[in-house]
Image: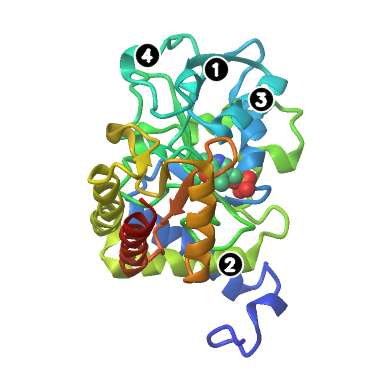
Amino acid sequence: MEFPGVGMSLLEMSHRSKPVVAMIESAEEDIRQLAGIPDNYRVLFLQGGASLQFSMVPMNLLTPNGKADHIVTGNFAKLALQDAQKVGNIRVAGSTEDSNFDHVPSQDELDLDPGAEYVHFTGNNTIYGTQWPTEPDVGDVPLVADLSSNIFSKPIDVSRYGLVYAGAQKNLGAAGVTLILVRDDLLSRSPENLPAMLKYSVHAKGKSAHNTPPVFSIYILGLVVKWLAQQGGLEHMERLNQDKAKLLYDELDSSEFFRGHALPEHRSLMNVTFRLPNPELETRFATEATAEGMVELKGHRSVGGIRASIYNAFPKEGVATLVSFMKEFERTHG
Ligand SMILES: *Cc1c(COP(=O)(O)O)cnc(C)c1O
């Protein structure tokens, strides 16, 4: 209720006041520390969700007559492609839609254009439960990534990217703020006539306060980043996330009743997707799990089945509870 040392709530304070400016600066500093962000990258807190970045990236990074490559690995990747194609010349350099997105492309499944101004990919695919084990190799072409559903779930080598964006609501805190990491040299690409709110360089110059930023969401993001550091940093989070996901994947691998959707080498640590022998059993599984306090397990309609989302903040005990429930469900319905 009271912002430390100020005597009123953050929600009552001007975004230009000293404590709020310092709060935003310290959130940025903590992010830099946590992820080892090089000095030649700007950290921006923007609005409009990850979805605004689908068009804002090409508006800023495509020069007149320029072209870019997109790699399509799921639902959000398709949405990113659709919006980017409204802005400029975007080519699909790889897609795994033919296999219902059960994996991400291997390097030789990619058809990259060396003349592209950037390559866009989606780090983790929530609906299908896949993730890239490492970034695609795009040579000297700037790599742009939507990391909304796996940012800070493991260490990141930011220097491999031109630009990273992530809506905060899955791994970083509350909805309302989108984290952007962008390499300095890319800021000068934006066309002169781009409206201010759509221009990265305007937000960089204004230190994310060109207009009123979502101060409360940034504050929460800052607290989450402090919490991640207190847990032991990103190496620790990766081990924890691997342990959590392994409980579920071991269960899938040892059962004939449950079948995982993603190919083992591209399995997501954040979203574990699987099927039961038939849709009736899947509905029953989700309903009975809900009765035992495990919610949101029904998979997205495009894959069906079950999806367990186990983002950074989700405790290992919760995963263990689900695994016990799975064993019991198989015993009684298998
Ligand atoms: C959740 C998600 C989004 C959507 O983010 P919004 O902030 O709601 O626009 C986009 N991309 C990926 C990879 C996601 O997981």
Task: Please tell me the numbered disc located at residue 82.
Answer: 3
Task: Please tell me the numbered disc located at residue 38.
Answer: none
Task: Please tell me the numbered disc located at residue 21.
Answer: 2
Amino acid type shown at disc 2: Val
How many other residues sit within 10 Å of disc 4, few (<14), some (14-19) or many (≥20)? few
In whole angstroms, how far apart are the C-alphas of marks 4 and 1? 17 Å
In whole angstroms, how far apart are the C-alphas of marks 2 and 1? 36 Å
- Mark 1 vs ligand 1: CB under 8 Å? no
Helix, strand or loop status at disc 3: helix
Judge left or right: residue 168 versus residue 103: right
Q: Which sits in the foreground, 10 or 124?
A: 124
Q: Position of residue 305 (x, y in %)?
A: 49, 43
Viewer-nearest of labels 3 and 2?
3
Q: Position of residue 291 (x, y in %)?
A: 52, 70
Amino acid type shown at disc 1: Ala
First in sequence: mark 1 or mark 3? 1
Residue on which the image places disc 1? 68
In whole angstroms, how far apart are the C-alphas of marks 3 and 4? 21 Å
Instruction: Identify the residue at horizontal 62%, vertical 86% (top origin).
Output: 1
Amino acid type shown at disc 4: Glu
Q: Which sits in the foreground, 136 or 213?
A: 136
Q: Position of residue 300 (x, y in %)?
A: 57, 43
How many other residues sit within 10 Å of disc 2, few (<14), some (14-19) or many (≥20)? some
How many other residues sit within 10 Å of disc 3, few (<14), some (14-19) or many (≥20)? some
Viewer-nearest of labels 2 and 1?
1
Residue on which the image places disc 4? 109
Residue 139 seen in the current view: yes
Q: Which sits in the foreground, 50 or 197?
A: 50
| Residue 201 image-quadrant placement | top right
Judge left or right: residue 155 versus residue 209: left
